[in-house]
Image (cartoon, rainbow, N blue to C red):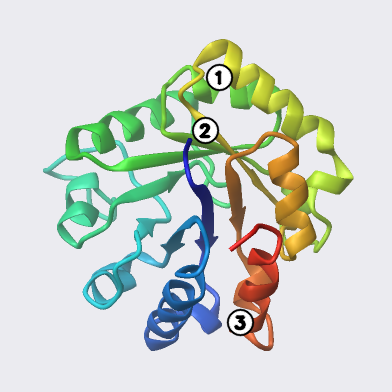
Amino acid sequence: MKMTKIVLNFKTYTEATGLAALELSRICEEVAAGYDVEMVVVPQTADIRLICENVSIPVFSQHVDGVGFGGYTGSVTAASIRGAGAAGTLINHSERRLQLAEIEASISACRTEGLATIVCTNNIATTRAAAALKPDYVAVEPPELIGSGIPVSKADPGIVTGSVEAVKMVEPEVGVLCGAGISRGEDLKAALELGSVGVLLASGIIRAKDQRRALEDLLSGIRG
């Protein structure tokens, strides 16, 4: 059985940039140590190496382009984030949408470099399509709930259970993460009860007045 996966997307918040990103990553590592979880931090590209050199938990990139070496100015390559120490990446976040062919190219590039992939989706149909590409995980997040403080597990539980069922039919080895509005222990508990194997979250932890306390509250949703 896979460990519960807790993926914290730093986005470009000032509270999770540079040295603040490193401090938050250390908090994540310390708090998660007492729980049966795999804690993953997802900083900005420029902060990946600094964080990888100072914590032992997995560090993912926020995006990878499906291109290799050559004339691709401004692109983020799988090889570059692997070289910086990253273990995986998000792909197709609602704030960085891609076409299906681009998602497939990104997954392929990551597979070549041995990087884990989490493809973000916004409904059951896109979850089904993403699962067919065989990423490691899909993370279902209705865009309208992102940053709202309203967890998808409460606002639209059917999209979670429906996504879990769709993935089981297409590619059972792909794990389903629940995202959007997740911030408290009860949210995590509900997400797991709906069949997800973990959560993808951001502002509820990143922008909390006390990030450590917020993370401890989130993890109270499972037994330590």
Q: Earlier in the sequence, mark 3 or mark 2?
A: 2
Task: Residue 211: give its label.
Answer: 3
Q: Position of residue 29 (x, y in %)?
A: 42, 73
- Residue type indicated by callout 2: Gly
Badge 1: few (under 14), some or many (20 or more) residues near its Cα, within 10 Å? Answer: some
Q: CA distance from mark 3 to mark 2?
A: 27 Å
- Residue type indicated by callout 3: Gln
Which element is circle 3 on?
helix
Q: Are marks 3 and 2 in contact (CB under 8 Å)?
A: no
Q: Are marks 3 and 1 in contact (CB under 8 Å)?
A: no
Which element is circle 1 on?
helix
Q: Residue at x 54, y 12 (%)?
A: 170
Q: Earlier in the sequence, mark 2 or mark 1?
A: 1
Q: CA distance from mark 3 to mark 1?
A: 35 Å
Q: Nearer the viewer, residue 60 or 34?
A: 34
Task: Name the residue carrying label 1.
Answer: 129
Q: Earlier in the sequence, mark 3 or mark 1?
A: 1
Q: Position of residue 98 (x, y in %)?
A: 49, 37
Task: Name the residue carrying label 2.
Answer: 175
In front of the other: label 3 or label 1? 3
